[in-house]
Structures are given as C-alpha cells and as structure tokens.
Amino acid sequence: MLMREIANAILAREETPFLPAFANNHGAIGLYEKLGFMTRWDPVLIVLQES
C-alpha cells in the first residue's frame, strides 16, 4: 500500500516512478511486477578498476 501511495504521488507530479533492480534479483522484480511496474530498460553495468 505504501509503494502505491508513493508511486501515485510521483505520478501526480507528472514524473515517472521507477524501481531499480539487478536482472538476477528475481524476488524484487516479481514484487515490482505485482505492483504494476514493468521492465523498460536493461542497463549494462561495467566496473572499471585501476591496474
């Protein structure tokens, strides 16, 4: 219920609510989908290290 209230407040400001999650976090993704969210972008994460 809290997530829906927050998402509705964001929508009322004419902004887009989003919830980030790594692709292998199936639990979070499942919960977000139950709340009505959908995957819109699959970013690639690259970690650079100084050699």
Image: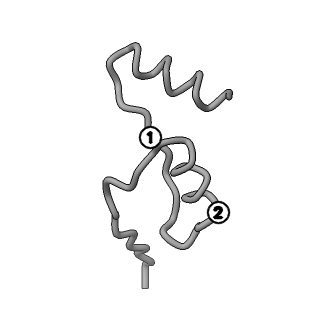
Q: Is residue 44 left or right of residue 47?
A: left
**Element at label 2:** helix
For badge 1, the amino acid type reads: Phe
Q: Position of residue 9 (x, y in %)?
A: 49, 17
From the image, state whether disc 2 or disc 1 is nearer to you.
2
Q: Determine the residue positioned at 58% across, 28% down.
A: 4
Q: How many marks?
A: 2
Q: Determine the residue positioned at 44% across, 40% down.
A: 18
User: In this picture, is 36 found above or below 9?
Assistant: below
Q: Position of residue 32 (x, y in %)?
A: 55, 49
Label 2 vs label 1: CA separation?
16 Å
Q: Which residue is mark 1?
A: 18
Q: Which residue is mark 2?
A: 27
- Residue toward you, 20 or 40: 40
**Element at label 1:** loop
> Which quadrant would the N terminus be assigned to in this image?
top right
Q: Is residue 25 left or right of residue 41?
A: right
Q: Determine the residue positioned at 61% across, 52% down.
A: 31
